[in-house]
Image (cartoon, grey):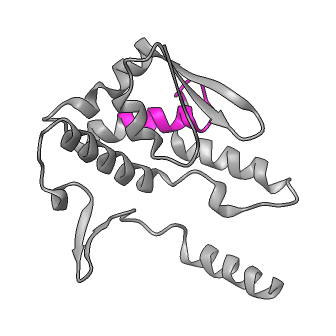
Amino acid sequence: MCCVVGEDIDLLVIIAASTNSENISFLKPGRGEEEIYQCSELQQVVNIFRDENACPDGIDKAGQKVLIALDGRKKSEETRDSLIFKLFQKSLVKDNFILVFLPPTTAAAREHSIRAYLQIQHWSGFIKKSLDWCWKETKHGLFSVTTHKEPAAPALLSMISFQVRKRV
């Protein structure tokens, strides 16, 4: 059996929940199906998402490995930041660079992995307090914490903002 997932869903949750499949494949637009992990490798990485007593640092480490694989690397030998930088460099030579298509930062990926862990715990019947797992309360209800860090240095953000205003 094989599990194939598309691009517009929470892949980390689906992969962690469906690792009974022999292989996990990822559909990439224009490139078709691409196998990202053999089941035995994936089982070892995502078992932490099923562990009721997992710690956030362990969840983050496992999530980083899966997300690096989703971003196109078979081996998770490089860091997420170096991968994002390589993908950014590749995208600069394209005519239609779209910043939103870059993978999330390491800090944002950490929060995402922890939220994915919470979702899997709830599916497994282990109720945990959302506020302890990357959610915050607002006047409109619960809101996910996407990162605790700035997306980039203020000087870089102002430079990007200036370039956008210049083009418009």
Looking at the figure, which quarter contains the C terminus?
bottom right
Residue at 27 percent of width and 34 percent of height: 49
Which quarter of the picture shows residue 160?
bottom right
Going by the image, does 100 lie left or right of 163? left
Residue 123, quarter of the rendered image:
top left
In the picture, measured across the screen, residue 13 lies left or right of residue 27, that is: left
Q: Is residue 64 magenta?
A: yes
Q: Position of residue 53 (x, y in %)?
A: 13, 35
Where is residue 62 drawn, in percent x and y?
Answer: 37, 33
| Picture mark count | 0
Q: Is residue 18 above or below residue 85?
A: above
Q: Is residue 86 left or right of residue 149?
A: right
Please identify the residue farthest to the front as the structure is shown.
1
* Residue in front for this viewpoint, 46 or 33: 33
1, 94: nearer the viewer: 1
Q: Residue at x 42, y 55 (%)?
A: 107
Q: Judge whether 67 appears above or below 33 on screen.
A: below
Magenta stretch contains residue 115: no
Query: Relative to 18, does residue 168 appear above or below in the rendering?
Result: below
Residue at horizontal 55 percent and vertical 77 percent from the top: 154
Q: Which residue is at the front of the view, 22 or 86? A: 22
Q: Which residues are magenta?
A: 62-77
Residue 44 located left or right of residue 142: right
